[in-house]
Image (spheres, rainbow, N blue to C red):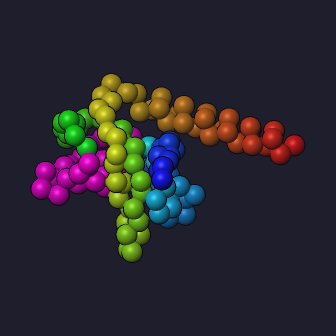
């Protein structure tokens, strides 16, 4: 039996709302944000981007030093709690200090636009 690991869809933290198509139980996502806090006891990190935040379960990550104020990117599966609180079960994490988050958001918008145009071209 082989288990396929899905690639993490690029999403901004602002897009992770209950009405979003990305807000699905088990969705494989890639998120980027500034580390606001981290608890060694629970292995839970909270990343922020603007006014949006997300809890990250880092219990499966090894050799990643987490520092508040640094920028991190995580890939993992979204776990949605009964109260609609989302936690990303991270399987990959990396420090991306130096990344221009404004430029990152612009490129994300361009990728979305390209994908939408490509889908429309396929349908025509």
Quadrant containing the C terminus in the rendered view? top right
Predominant secondary structure in magenta? Answer: strand
Residue 33 visible: no
Q: Residue furthest front?
A: 1
Q: Is residue 3 above or below residue 103?
A: below
Q: Which residues are magenta?
A: 31-60
- Residue depicted at x 62% and y 40%: 112
The image quarter in which residue 20 lies = bottom right
Can residue 91 be seen by looking at this rendering? Answer: yes
Is 28 in the magenta? no
| Outermost residue, left side | 41
Query: Residue 48 colored magenta?
Result: yes
* Left/right of residue 84 with respect to residue 65 in the rendered view: right
In this rendering, the count of numbered labels is 0
Q: Report which quarter residue 61 is drawn in.
A: top left
Residue 27's x, y, as percent? 49, 55
Q: Report x, y in % for residue 108.
A: 54, 36
Question: Residue placed farthest to the top in the image?
Answer: 98
Q: Position of residue 120 (x, y in %)?
A: 79, 43
Determine the residue located farthest toward the right in the rendered image. Answer: 124
Seen in the picture, residue 9 relative to 39 is either above or below; the reply is above
Q: Nearer the viewer, residue 18 or 62?
A: 62
Q: Residue at x 49, y 36 (%)?
A: 105
Q: Residue at x 20, y 35 (%)?
A: 63
Q: Image quadrant of residue 102?
A: top left
Q: Position of residue 8 (x, y in %)?
A: 48, 44
């Amino acid at each position: 039996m082989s288990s396929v690991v899905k690639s993490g869809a690029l999403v901004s933290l602002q897009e992770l709302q209950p009405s979003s198509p990305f807000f699905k139980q088990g969705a494989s996502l890639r998120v980027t944000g500034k580390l606001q806090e981290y608890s060694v006891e629970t292995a839970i990190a909270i990343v922020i981007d603007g006014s949006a935040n997300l809890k990250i379960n880092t219990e499966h990550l090894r050799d990643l030093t987490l520092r508040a104020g640094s920028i991190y990117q995580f890939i993992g599966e979204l776990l949605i709690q009964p109260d609609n609180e989302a936690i990303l079960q991270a399987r990959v994490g990396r420090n991306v200090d130096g990344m221009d988050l404004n430029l990152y958001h612009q490129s994300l918008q361009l990728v979305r636009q390209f994908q939408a145009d490509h889908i429309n071209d396929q349908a025509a």
